[in-house]
Amino acid sequence: MQNNHKFHALINGELVSGTQQMPVINPSNEEILTYCPQATPEDVERAIGAARKAWPAWRDAPMEQRRQTLHAIADCIEENAEELQRWITLEQGKPLAGAAVETSQAPAILRYFAEMDLSPRTLQDDERQRAELHRRPLGVVAAIVPWNFPLVMACYKLGPALIAGNTCLIKPSPTTPLATLRLGELIADLVPPGVVNILPDGGDVGPLLTGHTGINKVSFTGSTATGRAVMRSAADSLQRLTLELGGNDAAIVLDDVDVDAVAPQLFALAFVNSGQVCMSIKRLYIQSDIYDRMCDALAELARDAKLGEGLDPETQYGPVQNRKQFEAVQKLLEQAPQHGRVIAGGNTYGPGYFVEPTLIRDIEEGNPLVDEEIFGPVRSLLRFDDIDEAIARANNSPYGLGGSVWTQDLTLGKQIACRLESGSAWVNQHFAMAPHIPFGGHKQSGIGVEFAEAGLHEYTAIQSVVIAK
């Protein structure tokens, strides 16, 4: 496969080359990888119109047709996994192994939603009346996808949207459009025209979707700041919203753990995807008796980590995805010596947006390195003595996406996990997601949930059907 592939948007079943082109940068070398279409306001209106026109037929289509369509998309991803993985790696920067996770999870998620049931539920059936609860599709869904997991996140919005009977417009991130556009090219003949539309974004498409009267729901994954803007924009039209936003996940590590066994797990879950995961470990609260040993073990792992270009099979960690994020991480690194002691990493280099896995110990709350979400490979190691103190400090955050507890005492671990103010709480693991387990955020980490039956219901409206006898 060559980098000169000509990409197209998918609008109303047609592959559209567009009137404008935009560059896509390879974050491993800062060079232009290729060009792709840049959607215009006219393209947006055309796509929304197509989705609205296609909706009644898709809404009324037999459930089996929707199931078969999702399975066909899943088959297509599996059949073209190698090509899609390469595009993900080239545009996002992650190693091929990480891209392979996306191409394996995406079809699994689509197949999970394909088999879900939305049959009416009987609420009452007696001599007086029959009352049923129906789940009805909303209409046109705008799926706004971030740059850290471009393919799998597009699919975990697409799956519930389509099986519920909605049509969909997918907007990939401006910096990672290629794998999603390629998916659109591959599935153009598998879905009825207008049911799935994919619009590449130069940075101005999102505001055209949020608040548009032709869009019935927005499913947005991204930063809390942008989530607030989406919510404000949706107010006038009262669009339904699912917002999966930022996180500053804490891991509480008790002193009964085996440091040598647990340290590699903590390190992997803190630095997965070069730290660019909303639900990765970002703050490690380590009990005093093992604090020094755990810091040393984690620092050794950081120093041994292999950074590089994602196509290199030896690479463990790729670059930060884009220049804006790279510069934000650089700015925070400059502050690190003022607040703690850097025991591994701390450096950046190029070409490419490379940041060494960085660990900062002897640091406390009250500075951006701890209090803010760092979307990059920089993590803080905090000491605690008392468990209640650790829980209070972990909860003292505007975020509430995930959190974890690490201990050999599973009963105690569960008790602590249940006290964390987060949408997901894990014991002896972190970032443990699956299609059958809902995930969403508390506080400023989001509204609504993705995955599972609860996530599917976010793409529907309740209709009560009551029949007098």
Image: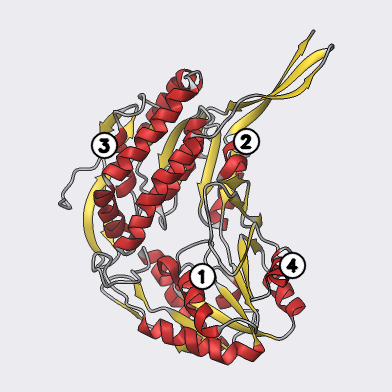
Classify mark 2: helix, strand or loop: loop
Residue at mark 1 to residue at mark 3: CA–CA distance = 36 Å
- State how far apart marks 1 and 4 are (Cα): 28 Å
Q: Residue at x 60, y 40 (%)?
A: 453
**Which image quarter holds the C terminus?**
top right
Crowd rating for badge 4 (residues with CA inside 10 Å; few <14, some 14–19, many 20+): few
**Residue bearing mark 1:** 374
Residue 398, quarter of the rendered image: bottom right
Distance Cα–Cα, label 3 vs label 4 = 55 Å
- Residue 21 in view: no
The residue positioned farthest toward the top in the image shown: 469
Q: Are marks 2 and 4 in contact (CB under 8 Å)?
A: no
Disc 4: which residue: 415
Q: Amino acid at mark 4?
A: Gln
Q: Against 160, is 203 above or below?
A: below
Dot 2 corresponds to which residue? 236
Q: Can you tell which of label 1 and label 2 is closer to the viewer?
A: 1
Q: Earlier in the sequence, mark 2 or mark 4?
A: 2
Q: Horizontal and vertical percent for residue 384?
A: 68, 84
Residue farthest to the right? Answer: 128
Kindly check if marks 3 and 2 are in contact, taking CB atoms under 8 A apart as contact: no
Q: Which residue is mark 3?
A: 18
- Residue 218 visible from this viewpoint: yes
The mark that comes first in sequence, 3 or 4, is 3
Q: Amino acid at mark 2?
A: Asp
In this view, 380 is above or below 469? below
Amino acid marked by disc 1: Ile
**371 w.r.t. 74: above or below:** below
Counting from the top left corner in percent of width and height, residue 18 is at: 26, 37
What element does badge 1 sit on?
loop
